[in-house]
Image (cartoon, grey):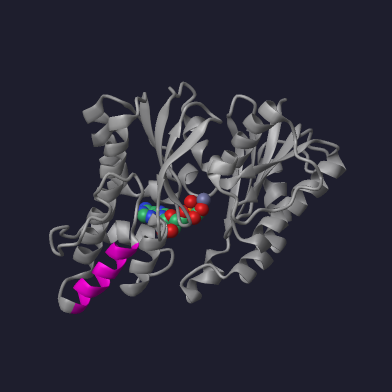
Amino acid sequence: MRVVLGIETSCDETAAAVVDEDFNVVSSVIESSIDVHRPFGGVVPELAGRAHVSTIGPVIARALHEAGLDPRCPGIDAIAVTSGPGLIGSLLVGLSAAKALALAWDVPFVGVNHLEGHLFAPLLETKDLRWPLLTLLVSGGHSMIVLQRDALGHEVLGETIDDAAGEAYDKVARWLGLGYPGGPEIDRLAQAGDAEALKLPISMLGDTLDLSFSGLKTAVVRATETHPDVATNDVAASFQRALCEQLLRKVDQSLESHDVKGVALAGGVAANSALREGMKDLARRHALACYLPSRAMCTDNAAMIAAAGLARMKASGPSGFDLSAEPNWLLAQV
Ligand code: KG4
Ligand code: ZN
C-alpha cells in the first residue's frame, strides 16, 4: 500500500488528509464550521451535518491537490473514514463520501474509531515511538487514560464518569462569558492569572483511575458567585490548575501499577499549555519518554484517521459496503 486518503467528519471539523505507508503526512486539510455554532455556545448537530455536506467535496479535492494528486484519478490505494463515535448526521456525510469514492476509484475503504484515531497522533510525528505507552486522551467528548501495548493494542484504565475535560473547559468558559470553544481562551487567560485565587476541589482522589469534572465545574460556579470580585484571569488559572492537577495525579497513579516506556497526550485538550508542561515534568520525574503531538495533530484532523485506518486495514482488512455509522462506538469495543 502506498497512500491512504483519510476522511474525518465526526463533529464540526470537515477534514481530509493523505498519509503514506510510513505514516508521513503528505497533506492535511481542516475546515471548521465553528463560526456557525459560536452564537449557540456549542456544536449544533444539524448545522454541523449541513456544513459537512457543503465542505466535504472541496476539502477532499484540496487534500489531494496539496498531495500533488489529480482529484479525478488520484492513485489513492485506500480510504480510511471515521465511522464513530460522533454526531450521527456528521458521521454519515464522511462515510457516504468514502463509500462513493471507494466505488468510483475501485479501492478498499475502512471505518475507523475516532478515539483510536486520536491515539495515532503521536505516531505521526515520532517514528521511533517506544511501547508500551500510557496515554491521556482528553477531548471535548471523551477523557480517558489508555494503556497502549502497541499501535492497535489498547486498554482503557480509567475514564470520566461525567463530563469530558474539554466539555468542562467549554462549560466554565460559557459561565465566564467567554467564547466557544472555551479551552483555548481559558488557557490564554490563565497564563496571566493567579491559580491560588480560588480554592477549588481536586476530584476523584481515591484508588480509582476514573476521572470526574462535573463537581469542579459546579465549584467554579459557586466560588464565582461567592467571590464575584475575583478577576476572570484568576478564575481561569484556578480552574485550569485544579483540572490539570486531577489529570496528572491520575496519570501518576496509573504509572504505579503499569510498567511503560513513555507517556503521551492526545485529543483536543492535549493542546493545553499547562497540561503539556505538567506531562513533561511527570515524564522527567519517572524518567520516561514524553510524546506531545503538535497542537494541529491534537485537535480533530484526518491524518490521524488515515494512520489508524492504515494499521487497521493491514491487521484485519477493509470494511464492507454495508458498514454503518456508530455514534456511540466505544474504544474498548474496537
Ligand atoms: O479532540 P477535539 O478537537 O474534538 C473532540 O473530539 O472533542 O477537542 C475539542 C476540545 C474542546 O472542548 C476545546 O475546548 C478543547 O478541546 N481544547 C482545549 C484547548 N484547545 C482545545 N482545552 C484546553 N486548552 C486548550 N488549549
Ligand atoms: Zn476528537
Question: Would you say 257 lies left or right of 202 here?
Answer: right
Q: Relative to residue 224, is residue 96 depicted above or below? A: above
Q: Nearer the viewer, residue 303 or 73?
A: 303
Question: Would you say 48 lies left or right of 176 here?
Answer: right
Question: Would you say 113 lies left or right of 56 here?
Answer: left
- Residues rendered magenta in the picture: 214-225
Q: Position of residue 189 (x, y in %)?
A: 27, 61
Q: Position of residue 241 (x, y in %)?
A: 23, 54
Tell me if residue 138 can be seen: no
User: Which corner quadrant of the image does residue 107 belong to?
Assistant: top right
Q: Residue at 46% of width from left, 57% of height from top?
A: 140
Q: Residue at 57% of width from left, 63% of height from top?
A: 33
Location of the N terminus (image quadrant): top right
User: Which corner quadrant of the image does residue 181 belong to?
Assistant: bottom left
Q: Position of residue 226 (x, y in %)?
A: 16, 77
Location of the C terminus (image quadrant): top right
Tell me if residue 108 can be seen: yes
Magenta-colored stretch includes residue 124:
no
Q: Nearer the viewer, residue 19 or 208?
A: 208
Q: What's the magenta bit mostly, secondary-structure-wise?
A: helix
Extreme front residue here? 207
User: Which corner quadrant of the image does residue 222 belong to?
Assistant: bottom left
Q: Residue at 58% of width from left, 58% of height from top?
A: 11
Q: Relative to residue 196, is residue 18 depicted above or below? A: above
Q: Position of residue 114 (x, y in %)?
A: 57, 46
Q: Residue at 47% of width from left, 36% of height from top?
A: 155
